[in-house]
Image (cartoon, helix red, strand yellow):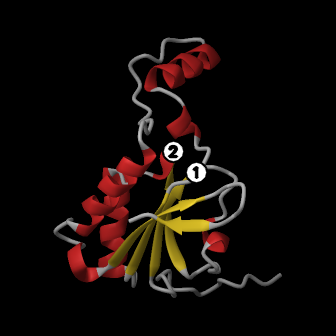
Amino acid sequence: MSFDLAGFDGVAQAGVAIVTCMDSRIDPLRMVGLRPGDAKIFRNPGGRVTPQALEALVLGVHLLNVRRILVIPHTRCAMAANSEQEVRRRVGESAGVDASWQRFGVVPDQEDALRQDVAAVRTHPLIGERAEVGGFVYDVDTGLIARRV
């Protein structure tokens, strides 16, 4: 048995980092025409630039060859289609316990959230102009990406 990435050093060969949603309809590398080993990928509900995502991006920029950062939420995202209260209610019903205390980070305005996220990366003191940053939206019905920021 052989493994194509054996001995790989773990840097982003194409110099790219992607922040996107955990949605199973998204294949982060394929949606931008890359292959395993080309990019660093950070996924979370809603594809938001969280403190953890910023931490990963800083490491990528300084230690893992990242020179371009793509923030890519998507259409028909459950985190943009439900209120915080609705998600808490549904999780609570599923868990059989009160989930009203849990924050899920729903996205009331996806376009505004994307602008804020891109700005947070561009103005981060450890990233700044060290990487080109863009905000895009992936359409889960067409497979196309549109630049927004």
What's the residue at 30%, 53% (across, down)? 116
Of the pair 62 and 130, the residue shown nearer to us: 130
Disc 2 vs disc 1: Cβ atoms closer than 8 Å?
A: yes
Determine whether 125 is above or below 16 in the image: above
Q: Which residue is mark 2?
A: 45
Q: Check the image and name the residue furthest to the right.
A: 1
Neighbourhood count class around disc 1 (C-alpha, 10 Å): few under 14, some 14–19, many 20 upward? some
Of the pair 2 and 19, the residue shown nearer to us: 19
Q: Which image quarter holds the C terminus?
A: bottom left
Q: Which image quarter holds the N terminus?
A: bottom right
What's the residue at 37%, 83% (across, down)? 67
Picture coordinates of residue 58 (x, y %)? Answer: 30, 69
- 126 left or right of 13 in image: left
Tag 1: residue type? Met
Under tag 2, what secondary structure? helix
Under tag 1, what secondary structure? loop
Of the pair 110 and 18, the residue shown nearer to us: 110
Q: Tag on residue 22?
A: 1
Picture coordinates of residue 53 (x, y %)? Answer: 38, 57
- 47 left or right of 24 in image: left
Q: Earlier in the sequence, mark 2 or mark 1?
A: 1
- 7 left or right of 55 in image: right
Tag 2: residue type? Pro
Picture coordinates of residue 122 (x, y %)? Answer: 26, 68
Determine whether 109 is above or below 128 in the image: above
